[in-house]
Amino acid sequence: MFHLEDDVADRKNYDFHSLNAPYEIALEEIDTPQLVELPQDGEILSLLRAVDSRHELADMHNLLDKGEAGQLGSFGSRTTMTAIRKQDPELLRWGLVAFLIWIPHSDDFRDDLPIMALFGHSAKKLGLSPWREFRRAAKRVPVARSWVRGWLLRLPWERSLKAWRYAESADDGGFRYQQTGIGPMPPELRAMLEEEEERKRKRRQP
């Protein structure tokens, strides 16, 4: 049974080593595609489960500094590919939770929107409902509810891989996503981002 004092998230209850484990990039890897899975990913998943077991998942974003939260965001984005490779819906769900925990620490939503498109596409490939999975994850990470709501209210095109210039691909390890085209941004995407930035600017005004 959890008493009131046990329900307050406390950093000392956890070992955050997995969120601070450096990944050294060898010179021959600089121009290669980003790794789909890192050695510490299993530890990160175990950490998330440990926090969840203490009913502190909703407050986890308060336990982390920006660098640690960034590691969760990166882990989440990788699960959009590793979950497909392993055919593991639960891994994708944990990845989405990890990504939403990162959101309050993010400085630029434009870097995060494409990853939401990857999550939606991966959910469909695993036979899941993106709408249901996004709403389910938002219940577990309430701080990101408005972010998820805003994403789900976007037009279907705005939530597609094509809009964010991603496509399905593969390498020796299996499925992966690949960015497509480095040319000018499509007018529809530019307009959408400009409108979002204007709304964000107005919210900041006193």
Image (spheres, grey):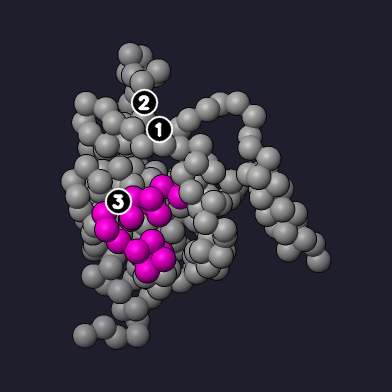
Three-letter code for the amino acid on which mark 3 is drawn = Lys
Marks 1 and 2 in Cβ contact (< 8 Å): yes
- Of all residues, the one furthest to the top in this rendering is 28
Q: Nearer the viewer, residue 149 or 164?
A: 164
What residue is shown with label 2? 33
Residue at 27 percent of width and 37 percent of height: 175
Is residue 90 shown left or right of residue 139? left
Is residue 118 shown left or right of residue 95? right
**What numbered label is drawn on residue 125?**
3
**Quadrant in the rendering for residue 132:** bottom left
Count neighbours of disc 1 (C-alpha within 10 A) and say few if under 14, some if 14 to 19, many if 20 or more: some
Residue at 45 percent of width and 32 percent of height: 179
Nearer the observer, disc 3 or disc 1?
A: 3
Real-space Cα distance between discs 3 and 2?
22 Å
Please state, as top left, top right, bottom left or bottom right, where the N terminus lies in the image: bottom left
Residue 27 appears anywhere in the view: yes
**What numbered label is drawn on residue 178?**
1
Q: Is residue 136 above or below residue 161?
A: below
In the image, is residue 130 part of the stretch drawn in magenta? yes
> Which region of the structure is painted magenta?
117-134
